[in-house]
Image: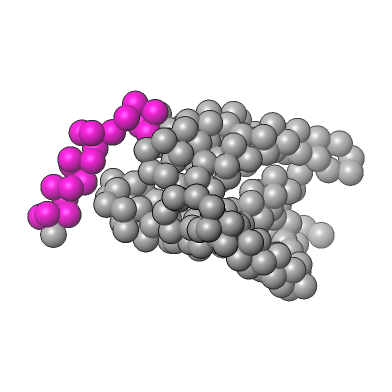
């Protein structure tokens, strides 16, 4: 256990400035997203832009780097959707997906995982390509669900974050493993808060 914390401290001392800023901005994004504050997307754009550089240059997670570039683009869409995405051009409300929609998301995600994993495993020196592809495929789905304020996004983020915990543990990036543990906790909190909103809205209708 002492070796683990020694590694965490060492990782923290050797962090690149981009990693520190990306982490701080990422926490701000999650906290504001839980509160349904549209400014979360601004901080998400900054965080993911930095993470794209970090994951490509420092950890060789090529698919994850592409994913973070995708996040940056989706951040601008998120700003628009959260402010004007409803049919009445008003702020979106939190809603749920049905079981058929979840089945479709999972099927598409697994298919995309196989395609991306195979390509990057065969043609690049990237690490843990299939796990990287899995997190990418379902993070894309979770991002679209977040943009549409679908409560299920938090469930998908919890699963994705748990996989990231293993991925960063496997490459010895223990500090980032701890950060994704915190992300998982925040995602659970986000789900519980948004669920209360959904239940309240159902009672009001």
Residue found 52% across the figure and 41% down from its top: 65
Q: Residue 14 colored magenta? A: yes
Q: Nearer the viewer, residue 89 or 120?
A: 120
Q: Is residue 55 left or right of residue 34?
A: left
Q: Quadrant of the C terminus?
A: bottom right
Residue found 27% across the figure and 52% down from its top: 172
Rendering coords of residue 183 (x, y %): 43, 50
Q: Nearer the viewer, residue 62 or 175?
A: 62
Rendering coords of residue 16 (x, y %): 32, 30
Rendering coords of residue 196 (x, y %): 61, 58
Q: Quadrant of residue 2?
A: bottom left
Q: Quadrant of residue 70?
A: top right
Q: Residue 169 colored magenta? A: no
User: Which residue of the protein is positioned furthest toward the left in this rendering?
Assistant: 2
Q: Quadrant of residue 156?
A: bottom right
Residue found 18% across the figure and 48% down from its top: 7
User: Which residue of the protein is positioned furthest toward the front in this rendering?
Assistant: 123
Which contiguous range is marked in magenta?
2-20
The answer to whether residue 195 is visible is no
Q: Is residue 69 left or right of residue 202?
A: left
Q: How many marks?
A: 0
Rendering coords of residue 188 (x, y %): 49, 58
Residue 22, placed above or below residue 128: above
Q: Nearer the viewer, residue 78 or 132?
A: 132
């Amino acid at each position: 256990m002492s070796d683990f914390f020694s590694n965490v401290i060492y990782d923290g001392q050797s962090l690149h400035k981009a990693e520190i800023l990306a982490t701080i901005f990422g926490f701000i994004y999650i906290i504001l997203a839980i509160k349904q504050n549209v400014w979360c997307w601004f901080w998400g754009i900054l965080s993911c832009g930095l993470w794209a550089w970090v994951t490509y240059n420092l950890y060789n997670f090529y698919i994850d780097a592409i994913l973070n570039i995708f996040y940056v683009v989706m951040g601008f869409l998120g700003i628009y959707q959260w402010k004007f995405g409803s049919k009445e051009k008003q702020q979106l409300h939190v809603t749920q997906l049905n079981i058929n929609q979840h089945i479709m998301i999972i099927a598409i995600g697994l298919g995309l995982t196989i395609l991306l994993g195979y390509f990057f495993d065969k043609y690049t020196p990237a690490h843990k390509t299939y796990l990287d592809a899995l997190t990418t495929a379902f993070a894309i789905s979770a991002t679209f669900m977040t943009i549409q304020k679908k409560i299920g996004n938090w469930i998908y983020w919890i699963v994705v974050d748990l996989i990231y915990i293993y991925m960063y543990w496997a490459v010895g990036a223990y500090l980032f493993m701890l950060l994704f543990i915190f992300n998982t906790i925040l995602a659970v909190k986000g789900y519980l808060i948004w669920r209360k909103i959904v239940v309240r809205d159902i009672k009001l209708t």
